[in-house]
Amino acid sequence: MAHQPDPRPTACLALADGTIFYGNGFGATGETQAELCFNTAMTGYQEIMTDPSYAGQIVTFTFPHIGNTGVTPEDDETADPVAAGMVVKWDPTEPSNWRATETLSAWLERRGRIAIGGVDTRRLTRAIRQQGAPHAALAHNPDGVFDLEALVARARAFAGLTGMDLAKDVTCAQSYRWDEMRWAWPQGYARQEAPQFKVVAIDYGAKRNILRCLASAGCDVTVLPASATTEEVLAHTPDGVFLSNGPGDPSATGQYAVPMIRGVLDQTDLPVFGICLGHQMLALALGARTVKMNHGHHGANHPVKDLDTGKVEITSMNHGFAVDSQTLPKGVLETHVSLFDGSNCGIRMADRPVFSVQYHPEASPGPQDSFYLFERFTASMAERQAR
C-alpha cells in the first residue's frame, strides 16, 4: 500500500512491512536505514537532529512547520547531526529568523543527512504507535527512480536497537574540559569563571546543553569517554559524577559502564546524577533491569509527576528503553513517573545523594521546569564539602 503524490516524488520511505511513503526529498541524496520514531516537539528540530541519543533512528516530526527558523551553529548539540534522517509533513520554507545562518535543506545536505517532505505524518505516527517503532529505509533521488524491493529488503535487514551499543560510536575520543554556560541575552554563551565543584561527566552521547547546565550551576566539568574506568574517574578527585544521555540499548552499554558506576558507589560517597541513558546505567548498576518500549517517548511536552512533592513537570524526553520499576531493589526509590503511561522517569537511593531522571532537564528543546535537578546535584556536593 502506498500513497504517491504528483508531481513525480524524489524521495520515499520504505517500512519493513512493505508500506511505502512517497514525498519530496531535500538535504543529502542517497539511502539510509534505521529505526523510525516520531517526535512531538514544536521547536528545536536542529537540537533534535544533533542529539546523540538519536543515533540509529530516523525522526518523524509531527509538527508540520519544520525548517521555518533555519539553522545556526549555536544550536548544535554536537558537532554533526546524529539522527539518520528526518520525515516532515510540509517542505521547509525559507527561514524567517534573525539568528539563522543557513537553510535546513542546505545544512542537511552539507552534513550528509537525508530528509523527506510531503509525507502524511499523522498516518505514519499512528502506525508507529499501533505497531511499534518499525525498521525503515529512506531514499532521496532527484531523478525519482527507486528500487522499492531493495529498499524494503534494506529496512528488513536493519539489525534494530535491541542489543546494540551505540554509546561507543558517539562518545568523545578523549577527555576534555567544559566551562561554557547556558545561552543568555545579550551576551550569548558566557564562561564559568568561578566554579565551586569539580564534576566528572561520563559521555555516553552528551548534549552540549547538559554540559552548559552543569557549568551554569557552578561546576568545573571534565568529560570522559563512555569507556572510562572507576580508577580514571576517581583520578580527577571529583566532587560529583554525572552520567549523560546517549543512544542504544542500555544493557549493551552497561557491559562496561555498570562496573565503573558500581566502583564509584562502592569506593566513595560521591553524589551521582544521571540523565536519560545515564539514568538507565545507574538503575542497572543498582540492580534493576531495562525494557524496550513499544514506540518510546520523544517530545518536549511530556508530563512527569514528582512522587516526593506531588508536583507535575512538563518535560523533554527522548528514549526508546525504560527502567522497569518492578525490578528496583530495596533501598532504591522511584521518584518520578510518566503521566502518559506510568513508566519510570526517576530514581534515587534512599540513604545517599545518588539520583537520576529519564527525561531531559536541560530542555533543549523543551520547557525549563526541571533545572532544579542540577541545583539539587550541586547542593549535595556542597553538603559533602561542608562535612
Image (tube, rainbow, N blue to C red):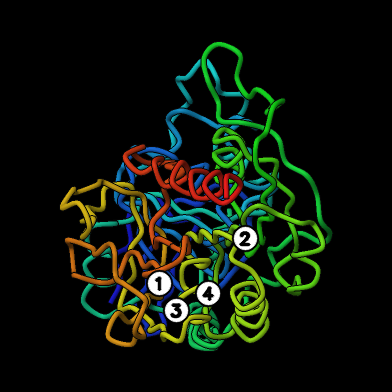
> Farthest residue toward the front?
387
Please identify, in this view, whether the residue under mark 2 or under mark 3 is nearer the observer: 2
Q: Is residue 6 visible?
A: no
Q: Amino acid at mark 2?
A: Gly
- Mark nearest the camera among 4 and 2 is 4
Q: Which mark is residue 320?
A: 1
* 296, above or below 379, in the image: below
Mark 4 → mark 1, Cα distance in angstroms: 14 Å
Q: Distance between the Cα atoms at labels 2 and 3?
A: 22 Å
Image coordinates of residue 346 in percent, x first then y, are 35, 64
Indicate left or right for 265 with 176 as reference.
left
For badge 4, the amino acid type reads Met
Mark 3 or 4: in front is 4
In the image: residue 93, left or right of residue 146: left
Q: CA distance from mark 2 to mark 1?
A: 15 Å
- Circle 1 Cα neighbour tier, 10 Å, few/some/many (<14 / 14–19 / ≥20): many
Residue 78 x/y as whole percent: 65, 47
* Of the image marks 3 and 4, the number of the one nearer the N terminus: 3
- The disc, 2 or 3, on the residue closer to the chain's N-terminal end is 3
Q: Residue at x 30, y 51 (%)?
A: 40
Provide the residue designation for mark 2. Answer: 205
Q: Is residue 136 left or right of residue 20?
A: right
Instruction: Please give the residue where the numbered disc 4 appears in the rendered image.
Output: 281
Q: CA distance from mark 1 to mark 3?
A: 13 Å
- Mark 3 residue type: His
Dot 1 or dot 3, earlier in sequence: 3
Nearest to viewer (mark 1 / mark 3): 1
